[in-house]
Amino acid sequence: MAKILGDQFVKSREAKGLTLEAVEEATQIKKNYLTAIEEEDYAELPGYTYGLSLVRKYATYLGMDVAEIAEDYKFQYNCEEKEAKLEEKRKRHIRMTPIRRVGLNPKWVFVYILGALLIAFFIAYVINPNGEMGALDSAANGLRLLKTAASSAAGFWQII
């Protein structure tokens, strides 16, 4: 990209017979920022908004058309920013197909195991081979055991 904006600053400054040091002293803009503006190296400026104010201040000091210079800066800054983003995308554009995990989610495995244990509990303790109520004397005891199992399951879910 041609350095049109930077060349305008250099020509205007040199036409007035000014050095970068003289401009730095008069405008209170650091010399490295003035150099960055003249070389259109906007990455050296401390951000878009601050850079725009520096460009405006420099253009005002040199007696240039501030509105036109500001528009040129905005256009060039946006173009450079877009080019930098595209370049960054190109660098990390190694597109890999995501690997699908085959298998069960650990939470669902826990649910299946808990269900199997509840069924085994029901068969072993509630219904015995004689068809009589085994270890559970009443529905209240069964409900208490289920609450204990459920609270254990809830604690496991918090860990996962």
Image (cartoon, grey):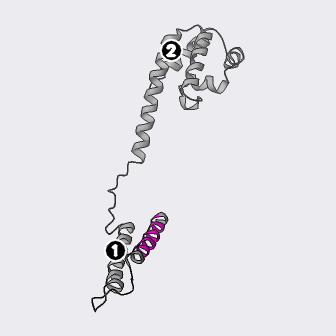
Q: Nearer the viewer, residue 58 or 112?
A: 112
Residue 74 location (% of width, % of height):
47, 21
- Residue at 32% in and 79% down: 119
Q: Quadrant of residue 82?
A: top left
Q: Callout 1: helix, strand or loop?
A: helix
Residue 138 magenta-drawn? no
Q: Check if mark 1's residue and mark 2's residue have beta carbons within 8 Å.
A: no
Q: Provide the residue span drawn in magenta.
A: 143-157
Q: Nearer the viewer, residue 54 or 120?
A: 120
Amino acid identity at mark 2: Ile
- In the image, is 93 to the left or to the right of 27? left
Seen as rendered, the residue at the extreme bottom is: 130
Residue 150 magenta-drawn? yes
Amino acid identity at mark 1: Gly
Question: What number is the disc on residue 115?
Answer: 1
Give the dominant element type of the magenta stretch: helix, strand or loop. helix
Q: Nearer the viewer, mark 1 or mark 2?
A: 1
Category of crowding for the residue at label 1, using alpha-carbon neighbours closer than 10 angstroms: few (below 14), some (14–19), many (at least 20): few
Residue 157 location (% of width, % of height):
45, 65
Sequence order check: which comes first, mark 1 or mark 2? 2
- In the image, is 158 to the left or to the right of 53? left
Q: Quadrant of residue 147?
A: bottom left
Q: Nearer the viewer, residue 141 or 149?
A: 141
The residue that mark 2 highlights is 69
Q: CA distance from mark 1 to mark 2?
A: 73 Å
Category of crowding for the residue at label 2, using alpha-carbon neighbours closer than 10 angstroms: few (below 14), some (14–19), many (at least 20): many
Q: Tell me the quarter of the image containing the N terminus.
A: top left
